[in-house]
Image (cartoon, coloured by chain):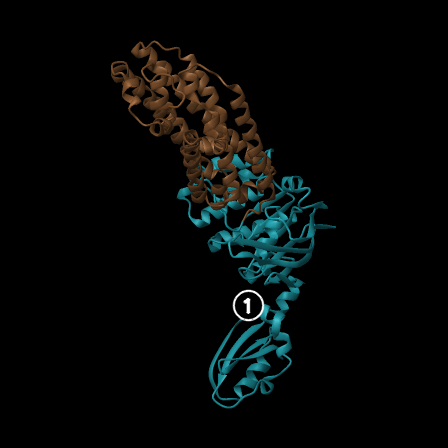
Amino acid sequence: MYIISVENLTKYYVQRSIRGTKENRGIENVSFNVKEGEIFGFLGPNGAGKTTTMRLLLDMIRPTSGSAKILGMDINEDSLEIRRKVGYIPGEINFYNERTAGYMLSYYEKLQGDSSSLKNELVSIFNIPLDRPVKTFSRGMKQKLAIIQGFMHDPSIVIMDEPTMGLDPLVQQRFYEFLLEQKKRGKTIFISTHILSEAQRVCDRVAIIKEGNIVAIEEVSKLAERSGRSIKVAFDDDVSASDLENDEIVSIRSINGGFRIQTGPSVSKTLKIIAKHKISDISITETSLEDIFLQYYEGESDV
Amino acid sequence: MHTLREKRSGILVFALFIFVFGIVMVAAYDSIGSELDMDALLENYPDIIMDFFGGDTIQSFGEFGGFYTLEYVTWVWFLIIPAYLAMVCSGLIAGEVENKTADTLLSYPVSRRRVLLEKYLAVVVMVAIVNFMGFFSTYVGVAAYGIEYCVKWVGIAMIQATPFLLIWTAAFTLFSVIFSDAKKVSTYSIVLVFLAYFVDVISNIWNDISFLGKLSPMNYFDPGLVMSQNIIRWQNSILLLATACVVMALGIYFFDKKDIL
Protein backbone atom coordinates (compact mmCIF):
# COMPACT_ATOMS: atom_id res chain seq x y z
CA MET A 1 0.00 0.00 0.00
CA TYR A 2 1.24 3.48 -0.86
CA ILE A 3 1.15 5.89 2.03
CA ILE A 4 2.08 8.86 -0.12
CA SER A 5 1.28 8.92 -3.81
CA VAL A 6 2.13 11.91 -5.93
CA GLU A 7 0.96 12.23 -9.51
CA ASN A 8 2.18 14.85 -11.97
CA LEU A 9 2.40 17.45 -9.24
CA THR A 10 3.36 20.82 -10.69
CA LYS A 11 3.87 24.15 -9.01
CA TYR A 12 4.71 27.45 -10.60
CA TYR A 13 5.16 30.44 -8.33
CA VAL A 14 3.40 33.46 -9.74
CA GLN A 15 5.26 36.70 -9.21
CA ARG A 16 3.16 39.78 -9.87
CA SER A 17 4.69 43.22 -10.30
CA ILE A 18 3.85 46.42 -12.15
CA ARG A 19 5.87 45.07 -15.08
CA GLY A 20 3.60 42.08 -15.39
CA THR A 21 3.27 38.51 -14.20
CA LYS A 22 6.16 36.10 -14.08
CA GLU A 23 6.00 32.39 -13.38
CA ASN A 24 8.89 30.73 -11.60
CA ARG A 25 9.30 26.99 -11.72
CA GLY A 26 8.81 25.14 -8.46
CA ILE A 27 8.35 21.55 -9.59
CA GLU A 28 7.10 20.00 -12.82
CA ASN A 29 5.14 16.77 -13.23
CA VAL A 30 6.59 15.18 -10.12
CA SER A 31 5.33 11.63 -9.55
CA PHE A 32 6.40 9.08 -6.96
CA ASN A 33 5.00 6.74 -4.34
CA VAL A 34 6.09 6.09 -0.78
CA LYS A 35 5.37 2.64 0.63
CA GLU A 36 4.12 1.95 4.11
CA GLY A 37 6.91 1.57 6.64
CA GLU A 38 9.75 2.73 4.41
CA ILE A 39 12.15 5.62 4.71
CA PHE A 40 11.94 7.43 1.41
CA GLY A 41 14.64 9.95 0.63
CA PHE A 42 14.23 13.00 -1.54
CA LEU A 43 17.63 13.94 -2.88
CA GLY A 44 18.57 17.08 -4.67
CA PRO A 45 20.62 20.26 -4.50
CA ASN A 46 19.23 23.51 -3.12
CA GLY A 47 16.50 24.94 -5.32
CA ALA A 48 15.72 21.58 -6.89
CA GLY A 49 12.15 21.54 -5.59
CA LYS A 50 12.38 19.37 -2.46
CA THR A 51 10.87 21.94 -0.12
CA THR A 52 8.21 22.89 -2.67
CA THR A 53 7.09 19.25 -2.87
CA MET A 54 6.92 18.93 0.91
CA ARG A 55 5.02 22.18 1.35
CA LEU A 56 2.55 21.05 -1.32
CA LEU A 57 1.99 17.80 0.59
CA LEU A 58 1.28 19.78 3.77
CA ASP A 59 -1.13 22.13 1.93
CA MET A 60 0.95 25.22 2.67
CA ILE A 61 1.11 25.98 -1.01
CA ARG A 62 -1.38 24.92 -3.66
CA PRO A 63 -0.47 22.98 -6.80
CA THR A 64 -0.72 24.50 -10.25
CA SER A 65 -1.71 21.06 -11.53
CA GLY A 66 -1.50 17.41 -10.58
CA SER A 67 -2.56 15.71 -7.39
CA ALA A 68 -1.25 13.89 -4.36
CA LYS A 69 -2.68 11.67 -1.68
CA ILE A 70 -1.52 10.79 1.79
CA LEU A 71 -3.15 7.74 3.38
CA GLY A 72 -5.55 7.84 0.45
CA MET A 73 -6.69 11.36 1.29
CA ASP A 74 -6.39 14.34 -1.03
CA ILE A 75 -3.70 16.80 0.14
CA ASN A 76 -5.97 19.82 -0.37
CA GLU A 77 -9.45 18.51 0.34
CA ASP A 78 -8.52 16.47 3.41
CA SER A 79 -5.60 18.55 4.61
CA LEU A 80 -6.80 18.83 8.22
CA GLU A 81 -7.26 15.08 8.59
CA ILE A 82 -3.86 14.46 6.99
CA ARG A 83 -2.15 16.90 9.37
CA ARG A 84 -3.69 15.04 12.30
CA LYS A 85 -1.70 11.97 11.27
CA VAL A 86 1.48 13.54 9.94
CA GLY A 87 4.47 15.01 11.74
CA TYR A 88 6.46 17.71 9.97
CA ILE A 89 9.92 19.11 10.49
CA PRO A 90 10.33 22.21 8.31
CA GLY A 91 13.64 23.00 6.65
CA GLU A 92 13.79 26.51 7.97
CA ILE A 93 12.37 26.30 11.46
CA ASN A 94 11.70 29.13 13.84
CA PHE A 95 9.92 29.42 17.15
CA TYR A 96 8.52 32.21 19.29
CA ASN A 97 11.93 33.20 20.52
CA GLU A 98 10.90 34.75 23.82
CA ARG A 99 9.20 31.51 24.89
CA THR A 100 10.86 28.51 26.48
CA ALA A 101 11.25 25.16 24.75
CA GLY A 102 8.78 23.70 27.24
CA TYR A 103 6.19 26.36 26.38
CA MET A 104 6.65 25.68 22.66
CA LEU A 105 6.12 21.94 23.07
CA SER A 106 2.99 22.52 25.21
CA TYR A 107 1.74 24.95 22.56
CA TYR A 108 2.19 22.33 19.82
CA GLU A 109 0.52 19.72 22.03
CA LYS A 110 -2.55 21.97 22.28
CA LEU A 111 -2.57 22.48 18.51
CA GLN A 112 -2.36 18.72 17.99
CA GLY A 113 -5.25 18.26 20.37
CA ASP A 114 -4.06 15.06 21.99
CA SER A 115 -1.38 13.92 24.38
CA SER A 116 2.16 13.66 23.10
CA SER A 117 3.11 10.14 24.07
CA LEU A 118 6.71 10.38 22.88
CA LYS A 119 7.49 13.82 24.30
CA ASN A 120 9.40 12.75 27.40
CA GLU A 121 11.31 10.04 25.57
CA LEU A 122 12.34 12.48 22.84
CA VAL A 123 13.34 15.18 25.30
CA SER A 124 15.67 12.75 27.01
CA ILE A 125 17.08 11.41 23.72
CA PHE A 126 17.83 14.84 22.32
CA ASN A 127 18.60 16.45 25.65
CA ILE A 128 16.76 19.77 25.41
CA PRO A 129 16.59 22.21 28.35
CA LEU A 130 12.85 22.84 28.51
CA ASP A 131 13.10 25.85 30.82
CA ARG A 132 15.34 27.93 28.56
CA PRO A 133 13.96 30.54 26.13
CA VAL A 134 14.37 29.49 22.52
CA LYS A 135 16.26 32.71 21.76
CA THR A 136 19.21 31.32 23.73
CA PHE A 137 19.31 28.16 21.60
CA SER A 138 21.94 27.48 18.94
CA ARG A 139 20.89 26.39 15.43
CA GLY A 140 21.46 22.77 16.43
CA MET A 141 19.37 23.07 19.61
CA LYS A 142 16.51 24.60 17.62
CA GLN A 143 16.77 21.74 15.15
CA LYS A 144 16.55 19.23 18.01
CA LEU A 145 13.44 21.00 19.28
CA ALA A 146 12.01 20.80 15.75
CA ILE A 147 12.66 17.06 15.66
CA ILE A 148 10.94 16.59 19.02
CA GLN A 149 7.84 18.51 17.91
CA GLY A 150 7.71 16.53 14.67
CA PHE A 151 7.70 13.16 16.40
CA MET A 152 6.22 13.77 19.85
CA HIS A 153 2.61 12.97 19.01
CA ASP A 154 3.72 9.64 17.57
CA PRO A 155 2.47 10.23 14.00
CA SER A 156 2.33 7.34 11.56
CA ILE A 157 4.02 9.46 8.86
CA VAL A 158 6.76 12.04 9.30
CA ILE A 159 7.78 14.49 6.61
CA MET A 160 11.18 16.06 7.19
CA ASP A 161 12.93 18.74 5.21
CA GLU A 162 16.69 18.42 5.71
CA PRO A 163 16.31 17.53 9.39
CA THR A 164 20.00 17.16 10.21
CA MET A 165 20.92 20.73 9.20
CA GLY A 166 22.83 22.28 12.07
CA LEU A 167 23.12 19.07 14.10
CA ASP A 168 26.60 18.09 15.28
CA PRO A 169 27.88 14.68 14.09
CA LEU A 170 27.13 12.96 17.41
CA VAL A 171 23.52 14.12 17.46
CA GLN A 172 23.24 13.24 13.76
CA GLN A 173 24.23 9.66 14.60
CA ARG A 174 21.69 9.56 17.43
CA PHE A 175 19.08 10.91 15.03
CA TYR A 176 19.82 8.25 12.40
CA GLU A 177 19.51 5.53 15.05
CA PHE A 178 16.25 7.06 16.20
CA LEU A 179 14.94 7.12 12.61
CA LEU A 180 15.77 3.47 12.06
CA GLU A 181 14.09 2.61 15.34
CA GLN A 182 10.98 4.54 14.27
CA LYS A 183 11.00 2.62 11.01
CA LYS A 184 11.00 -0.63 12.99
CA ARG A 185 7.97 0.69 14.85
CA GLY A 186 6.19 0.92 11.52
CA LYS A 187 6.47 4.62 10.76
CA THR A 188 6.68 5.88 7.21
CA ILE A 189 9.27 8.58 6.77
CA PHE A 190 9.71 11.00 3.89
CA ILE A 191 13.01 12.82 4.27
CA SER A 192 14.65 15.37 2.02
CA THR A 193 18.38 15.78 2.03
CA HIS A 194 21.29 16.81 -0.12
CA ILE A 195 23.69 14.60 1.82
CA LEU A 196 24.25 11.34 -0.02
CA SER A 197 25.75 9.54 2.99
CA GLU A 198 22.65 10.42 5.00
CA ALA A 199 20.38 8.89 2.36
CA GLN A 200 22.61 5.83 2.15
CA ARG A 201 22.54 5.43 5.92
CA VAL A 202 18.79 5.57 6.53
CA CYS A 203 16.78 5.41 3.33
CA ASP A 204 15.27 2.38 1.64
CA ARG A 205 14.56 4.19 -1.61
CA VAL A 206 15.32 7.64 -2.94
CA ALA A 207 13.96 9.97 -5.56
CA ILE A 208 16.46 12.32 -7.16
CA ILE A 209 15.09 15.69 -8.13
CA LYS A 210 16.81 18.32 -10.16
CA GLU A 211 15.44 21.58 -11.49
CA GLY A 212 11.95 20.61 -10.44
CA ASN A 213 11.92 17.24 -12.16
CA ILE A 214 12.34 13.75 -10.80
CA VAL A 215 15.28 12.22 -12.67
CA ALA A 216 15.42 8.87 -10.92
CA ILE A 217 13.75 6.78 -8.28
CA GLU A 218 15.98 4.03 -7.03
CA GLU A 219 16.58 1.72 -4.16
CA VAL A 220 19.50 2.95 -2.11
CA SER A 221 21.40 -0.28 -2.66
CA LYS A 222 21.39 0.44 -6.39
CA LEU A 223 22.36 4.04 -5.83
CA ALA A 224 25.30 2.82 -3.77
CA GLU A 225 26.47 0.76 -6.73
CA ARG A 226 26.80 3.96 -8.67
CA SER A 227 28.60 5.54 -5.79
CA GLY A 228 32.11 4.68 -6.92
CA ARG A 229 35.06 7.03 -7.32
CA SER A 230 35.57 10.33 -9.02
CA ILE A 231 39.02 10.74 -10.59
CA LYS A 232 40.24 14.11 -11.78
CA VAL A 233 43.33 13.73 -13.87
CA ALA A 234 45.43 15.90 -16.19
CA PHE A 235 48.22 14.67 -18.46
CA ASP A 236 51.35 16.20 -19.91
CA ASP A 237 51.13 14.00 -22.98
CA ASP A 238 48.35 13.88 -25.51
CA VAL A 239 45.54 11.65 -24.18
CA SER A 240 42.00 11.31 -25.51
CA ALA A 241 38.93 10.04 -23.65
CA SER A 242 38.87 6.92 -25.80
CA ASP A 243 42.41 6.05 -24.61
CA LEU A 244 41.10 5.76 -21.06
CA GLU A 245 37.94 3.79 -21.71
CA ASN A 246 37.42 0.53 -19.86
CA ASP A 247 34.52 -1.34 -18.23
CA GLU A 248 35.02 0.32 -14.81
CA ILE A 249 34.20 3.74 -16.15
CA VAL A 250 30.66 5.02 -15.77
CA SER A 251 31.27 8.39 -17.38
CA ILE A 252 34.14 10.54 -18.54
CA ARG A 253 34.16 14.26 -19.28
CA SER A 254 36.84 16.70 -20.42
CA ILE A 255 37.35 19.52 -17.94
CA ASN A 256 40.03 22.24 -17.82
CA GLY A 257 42.46 20.42 -20.04
CA GLY A 258 42.07 17.16 -18.13
CA PHE A 259 39.38 14.56 -17.46
CA ARG A 260 36.81 13.87 -14.81
CA ILE A 261 36.27 10.14 -14.70
CA GLN A 262 33.41 8.50 -12.89
CA THR A 263 34.01 4.88 -12.03
CA GLY A 264 32.18 2.13 -10.22
CA PRO A 265 33.48 0.87 -6.88
CA SER A 266 36.58 -0.62 -8.54
CA VAL A 267 39.29 1.65 -10.00
CA SER A 268 42.26 -0.66 -10.53
CA LYS A 269 41.98 -1.00 -14.33
CA THR A 270 41.44 2.71 -14.75
CA LEU A 271 44.46 3.55 -12.63
CA LYS A 272 46.62 1.14 -14.62
CA ILE A 273 45.58 2.83 -17.85
CA ILE A 274 46.16 6.28 -16.38
CA ALA A 275 49.60 5.20 -15.13
CA LYS A 276 50.68 4.44 -18.69
CA HIS A 277 50.53 8.17 -19.42
CA LYS A 278 52.48 11.14 -18.10
CA ILE A 279 50.32 12.45 -15.24
CA SER A 280 50.59 16.12 -14.32
CA ASP A 281 47.87 16.11 -11.64
CA ILE A 282 45.51 13.56 -10.16
CA SER A 283 42.95 13.36 -7.36
CA ILE A 284 40.66 10.48 -6.41
CA THR A 285 37.58 11.11 -4.30
CA GLU A 286 34.39 9.26 -3.39
CA THR A 287 31.58 9.96 -5.81
CA SER A 288 29.61 12.93 -4.57
CA LEU A 289 25.91 13.43 -4.95
CA GLU A 290 26.73 15.99 -7.61
CA ASP A 291 28.64 13.35 -9.57
CA ILE A 292 25.63 11.06 -9.42
CA PHE A 293 23.43 13.86 -10.69
CA LEU A 294 25.86 14.33 -13.55
CA GLN A 295 25.61 10.65 -14.33
CA TYR A 296 21.85 10.93 -14.52
CA TYR A 297 21.88 14.02 -16.66
CA GLU A 298 24.79 13.79 -19.02
CA GLY A 299 27.44 11.41 -17.75
CA GLU A 300 26.03 8.24 -19.15
CA SER A 301 25.98 9.56 -22.67
CA ASP A 302 29.57 10.83 -22.42
CA VAL A 303 31.20 7.41 -22.19
CA MET B 1 -4.44 32.70 23.90
CA HIS B 2 -0.93 32.54 22.50
CA THR B 3 -1.32 35.86 20.64
CA LEU B 4 -2.64 37.51 23.81
CA ARG B 5 0.26 36.12 25.82
CA GLU B 6 2.73 37.37 23.23
CA LYS B 7 1.28 40.88 23.35
CA ARG B 8 0.60 40.90 27.09
CA SER B 9 3.27 43.37 28.18
CA GLY B 10 2.63 45.68 25.23
CA ILE B 11 -1.10 45.85 25.88
CA LEU B 12 -0.55 46.48 29.61
CA VAL B 13 1.75 49.41 28.90
CA PHE B 14 -0.66 50.77 26.31
CA ALA B 15 -3.68 50.40 28.62
CA LEU B 16 -1.73 52.24 31.31
CA PHE B 17 -1.01 55.03 28.82
CA ILE B 18 -4.74 55.30 28.02
CA PHE B 19 -5.54 55.45 31.71
CA VAL B 20 -2.91 58.04 32.61
CA PHE B 21 -3.67 60.21 29.57
CA GLY B 22 -7.37 60.13 30.49
CA ILE B 23 -6.69 61.18 34.07
CA VAL B 24 -4.34 63.95 32.88
CA MET B 25 -7.07 65.30 30.57
CA VAL B 26 -9.66 65.24 33.36
CA ALA B 27 -7.15 67.12 35.54
CA ALA B 28 -6.52 69.57 32.69
CA TYR B 29 -10.25 70.27 32.42
CA ASP B 30 -10.43 70.73 36.15
CA SER B 31 -7.62 73.30 36.18
CA ILE B 32 -8.06 75.05 32.80
CA GLY B 33 -11.26 74.04 31.07
CA SER B 34 -13.67 75.14 33.72
CA GLU B 35 -11.99 78.51 34.25
CA LEU B 36 -11.40 79.57 30.66
CA ASP B 37 -14.21 80.42 28.31
CA MET B 38 -13.25 77.69 25.86
CA ASP B 39 -16.13 78.39 23.49
CA ALA B 40 -15.09 82.02 23.11
CA LEU B 41 -11.50 80.99 22.62
CA LEU B 42 -12.24 78.33 19.99
CA GLU B 43 -14.75 80.50 18.15
CA ASN B 44 -11.81 82.46 16.75
CA TYR B 45 -10.39 79.31 15.18
CA PRO B 46 -11.30 78.66 11.52
CA ASP B 47 -13.80 75.84 10.89
CA ILE B 48 -11.14 73.69 9.22
CA ILE B 49 -9.12 73.61 12.43
CA MET B 50 -12.17 72.74 14.52
CA ASP B 51 -13.15 70.00 12.09
CA PHE B 52 -9.62 68.71 12.10
CA PHE B 53 -9.80 68.22 15.83
CA GLY B 54 -13.20 66.58 15.59
CA GLY B 55 -15.07 69.52 16.98
CA ASP B 56 -17.84 69.71 14.39
CA THR B 57 -20.45 67.98 16.53
CA ILE B 58 -19.41 69.30 19.91
CA GLN B 59 -22.02 71.54 21.47
CA SER B 60 -19.86 73.33 24.00
CA PHE B 61 -16.16 73.10 24.71
CA GLY B 62 -16.67 74.68 28.08
CA GLU B 63 -18.48 71.67 29.46
CA PHE B 64 -16.65 68.43 30.24
CA GLY B 65 -18.08 66.25 27.43
CA GLY B 66 -16.98 68.68 24.71
CA PHE B 67 -13.58 69.36 26.21
CA TYR B 68 -12.87 65.68 26.80
CA THR B 69 -13.92 64.71 23.25
CA LEU B 70 -11.69 67.38 21.76
CA GLU B 71 -8.61 66.86 23.90
CA TYR B 72 -8.68 63.13 24.60
CA VAL B 73 -11.12 60.87 22.77
CA THR B 74 -10.60 62.28 19.25
CA TRP B 75 -6.83 62.03 19.39
CA VAL B 76 -6.58 58.72 21.13
CA TRP B 77 -9.43 56.80 19.48
CA PHE B 78 -9.15 58.28 15.99
CA LEU B 79 -5.40 58.13 15.62
CA ILE B 80 -3.33 56.68 18.45
CA ILE B 81 -5.26 53.44 19.09
CA PRO B 82 -5.71 52.61 15.37
CA ALA B 83 -1.97 53.23 14.86
CA TYR B 84 -1.21 50.92 17.79
CA LEU B 85 -3.57 48.27 16.41
CA ALA B 86 -1.89 48.62 13.01
CA MET B 87 1.40 47.61 14.58
CA VAL B 88 -0.17 44.74 16.54
CA CYS B 89 -2.09 43.38 13.54
CA SER B 90 0.89 43.60 11.19
CA GLY B 91 2.42 40.62 12.96
CA LEU B 92 -0.71 38.48 13.06
CA ILE B 93 -0.16 36.66 9.80
CA ALA B 94 2.62 38.53 7.97
CA GLY B 95 4.85 38.25 11.05
CA GLU B 96 4.25 34.51 11.34
CA VAL B 97 4.99 34.01 7.64
CA GLU B 98 8.05 36.27 7.74
CA ASN B 99 9.51 34.59 10.84
CA LYS B 100 8.74 31.12 9.45
CA THR B 101 6.69 30.23 12.55
CA ALA B 102 3.67 29.78 10.27
CA ASP B 103 5.28 26.66 8.78
CA THR B 104 5.12 24.73 12.01
CA LEU B 105 1.80 26.24 13.08
CA LEU B 106 0.07 25.23 9.85
CA SER B 107 1.55 21.74 9.88
CA TYR B 108 -0.76 21.00 12.82
CA PRO B 109 -4.45 20.13 12.42
CA VAL B 110 -5.74 23.69 12.65
CA SER B 111 -7.60 25.33 9.81
CA ARG B 112 -6.40 28.66 8.47
CA ARG B 113 -9.83 30.06 9.29
CA ARG B 114 -9.41 29.10 12.93
CA VAL B 115 -5.90 30.56 13.06
CA LEU B 116 -7.08 33.87 11.62
CA LEU B 117 -10.23 34.12 13.76
CA GLU B 118 -8.39 33.29 16.97
CA LYS B 119 -5.78 35.90 16.24
CA TYR B 120 -8.50 38.42 15.42
CA LEU B 121 -10.34 37.58 18.63
CA ALA B 122 -7.14 38.19 20.59
CA VAL B 123 -7.07 41.71 19.17
CA VAL B 124 -10.79 42.10 19.97
CA VAL B 125 -9.87 41.42 23.61
CA MET B 126 -7.19 44.13 23.38
CA VAL B 127 -9.76 46.52 21.93
CA ALA B 128 -12.10 45.73 24.84
CA ILE B 129 -9.28 46.40 27.32
CA VAL B 130 -8.36 49.81 25.87
CA ASN B 131 -12.01 50.86 25.62
CA PHE B 132 -12.63 49.82 29.18
CA MET B 133 -9.54 51.75 30.23
CA GLY B 134 -10.90 54.82 28.44
CA PHE B 135 -14.12 54.57 30.45
CA PHE B 136 -12.39 53.62 33.70
CA SER B 137 -9.91 56.52 33.60
CA THR B 138 -12.78 58.96 33.02
CA TYR B 139 -14.80 57.41 35.84
CA VAL B 140 -11.86 57.63 38.24
CA GLY B 141 -10.89 61.14 37.09
CA VAL B 142 -14.40 62.56 37.24
CA ALA B 143 -14.93 61.08 40.71
CA ALA B 144 -11.51 62.21 41.98
CA TYR B 145 -11.89 65.81 40.77
CA GLY B 146 -15.59 66.04 41.62
CA ILE B 147 -16.59 67.05 38.09
CA GLU B 148 -20.31 67.12 37.38
CA TYR B 149 -20.68 64.85 34.42
CA CYS B 150 -22.62 61.67 33.81
CA VAL B 151 -19.89 59.16 32.81
CA LYS B 152 -22.56 56.96 31.29
CA TRP B 153 -22.05 58.95 28.07
CA VAL B 154 -18.35 58.11 28.02
CA GLY B 155 -19.32 54.46 28.54
CA ILE B 156 -21.68 54.61 25.53
CA ALA B 157 -18.99 56.32 23.44
CA MET B 158 -16.59 53.53 24.38
CA ILE B 159 -19.14 50.87 23.41
CA GLN B 160 -19.51 52.64 20.05
CA ALA B 161 -15.73 52.80 19.77
CA THR B 162 -15.63 48.99 19.74
CA PRO B 163 -17.07 48.42 16.22
CA PHE B 164 -15.06 51.43 15.06
CA LEU B 165 -11.83 49.79 16.23
CA LEU B 166 -12.97 46.36 15.03
CA ILE B 167 -13.26 47.56 11.47
CA TRP B 168 -9.71 48.89 11.65
CA THR B 169 -8.55 45.61 13.15
CA ALA B 170 -10.28 43.68 10.35
CA ALA B 171 -8.71 45.92 7.69
CA PHE B 172 -5.22 45.57 9.19
CA THR B 173 -5.68 41.81 9.51
CA LEU B 174 -6.64 41.68 5.83
CA PHE B 175 -3.43 43.59 5.00
CA SER B 176 -1.48 41.15 7.15
CA VAL B 177 -2.92 38.29 5.10
CA ILE B 178 -2.26 39.91 1.72
CA PHE B 179 1.27 41.21 2.32
CA SER B 180 3.81 38.84 3.82
CA ASP B 181 5.93 41.69 5.15
CA ALA B 182 5.05 42.99 8.60
CA LYS B 183 6.74 46.39 8.09
CA LYS B 184 4.84 46.94 4.86
CA VAL B 185 1.58 45.99 6.60
CA SER B 186 2.07 48.42 9.50
CA THR B 187 3.12 51.24 7.13
CA TYR B 188 0.15 50.75 4.81
CA SER B 189 -2.18 50.44 7.80
CA ILE B 190 -1.02 53.65 9.46
CA VAL B 191 -1.19 55.51 6.14
CA LEU B 192 -4.77 54.23 5.74
CA VAL B 193 -5.76 55.53 9.20
CA PHE B 194 -4.41 59.02 8.54
CA LEU B 195 -5.88 59.04 5.04
CA ALA B 196 -9.33 58.08 6.40
CA TYR B 197 -9.08 60.80 9.05
CA PHE B 198 -8.02 63.35 6.47
CA VAL B 199 -10.83 62.32 4.09
CA ASP B 200 -13.36 62.61 6.92
CA VAL B 201 -12.19 66.12 7.84
CA ILE B 202 -12.00 67.35 4.24
CA SER B 203 -15.42 65.95 3.34
CA ASN B 204 -16.93 67.75 6.33
CA ILE B 205 -15.54 71.05 5.10
CA TRP B 206 -16.23 70.82 1.38
CA ASN B 207 -19.76 69.68 0.65
CA ASP B 208 -18.87 68.84 -2.94
CA ILE B 209 -16.86 65.86 -1.78
CA SER B 210 -19.01 64.92 1.20
CA PHE B 211 -19.66 61.52 -0.45
CA LEU B 212 -15.99 60.67 0.12
CA GLY B 213 -16.52 60.99 3.86
CA LYS B 214 -18.89 58.06 3.74
CA LEU B 215 -15.92 55.85 2.91
CA SER B 216 -14.16 56.76 6.13
CA PRO B 217 -14.90 54.77 9.33
CA MET B 218 -14.49 58.07 11.24
CA ASN B 219 -17.77 59.19 9.66
CA TYR B 220 -19.61 56.47 11.60
CA PHE B 221 -18.13 57.01 15.04
CA ASP B 222 -18.83 60.41 16.55
CA PRO B 223 -17.84 60.57 20.22
CA GLY B 224 -18.67 64.30 20.31
CA LEU B 225 -22.28 63.56 19.43
CA VAL B 226 -22.60 61.16 22.35
CA MET B 227 -20.45 62.83 24.97
CA SER B 228 -21.41 66.44 24.23
CA GLN B 229 -24.92 66.28 22.76
CA ASN B 230 -25.95 62.92 24.29
CA ILE B 231 -27.24 61.67 20.94
CA ILE B 232 -26.78 57.96 20.22
CA ARG B 233 -26.73 56.54 16.70
CA TRP B 234 -26.55 52.77 17.06
CA GLN B 235 -27.24 52.26 13.35
CA ASN B 236 -23.75 53.58 12.59
CA SER B 237 -22.23 51.09 15.03
CA ILE B 238 -24.17 48.25 13.42
CA LEU B 239 -22.99 49.35 9.99
CA LEU B 240 -19.37 49.37 11.20
CA LEU B 241 -19.76 45.95 12.78
CA ALA B 242 -21.31 44.49 9.63
CA THR B 243 -18.51 45.97 7.50
CA ALA B 244 -15.91 44.55 9.88
CA CYS B 245 -17.48 41.10 9.39
CA VAL B 246 -17.34 41.48 5.60
CA VAL B 247 -13.68 42.57 5.73
CA MET B 248 -12.85 39.62 7.99
CA ALA B 249 -14.65 37.26 5.59
CA LEU B 250 -12.41 38.65 2.84
CA GLY B 251 -9.39 38.06 5.07
CA ILE B 252 -10.41 34.42 5.62
CA TYR B 253 -11.00 33.97 1.88
CA PHE B 254 -7.58 35.33 0.91
CA PHE B 255 -5.80 33.46 3.71
CA ASP B 256 -7.40 30.22 2.56
CA LYS B 257 -6.11 30.81 -0.98
CA LYS B 258 -2.70 32.08 0.03
CA ASP B 259 0.54 30.22 -0.58
CA ILE B 260 2.54 30.27 2.64
CA LEU B 261 6.03 30.91 1.28
In the rendered structure, the colour chosen for chain B is brown
Depth order, front residue of B44/A119: B44
> What residue is shown at x 35% (from left), y 24% (from top)?
B16
Depth order, front residue of A293/A219: A293
Q: Is residue A267 visible?
A: yes
Instruction: Answer with left or right where residue B157 lies relative to residue A195.
Output: left
Instruction: Answer with left or right where residue B141 lies relative to residue A23.
Output: left
Question: Measured from the top left, where is residue B213 in percent x and y?
Answer: 47, 31
Quarter the C terminus of chain A occupies: bottom right
Question: Measured from the top left, where is residue A110 in percent x and y?
Answer: 56, 33
In the rendered structure, the colour chosen for chain A is cyan
Depth order, front residue of A201/B241: B241
Depth order, front residue of A185/B41: B41
Q: Is residue A256 above or below residue A65?
A: below
Q: Which residue is mark 1?
A: A290
Q: Quarter of the image holding residue A289?
A: bottom right
Toward the front, the furthest residue is: B208
> What residue is shown at x 57% (from left), y 47% (from top)?
B259
Instruction: Answer with left or right where residue A60 lies relative to residue B39.
Output: right
Q: Amino acid at mark 1?
A: Glu
Q: Is residue A71 visible?
A: no
Q: Is residue A102 above or below residue A215?
A: above
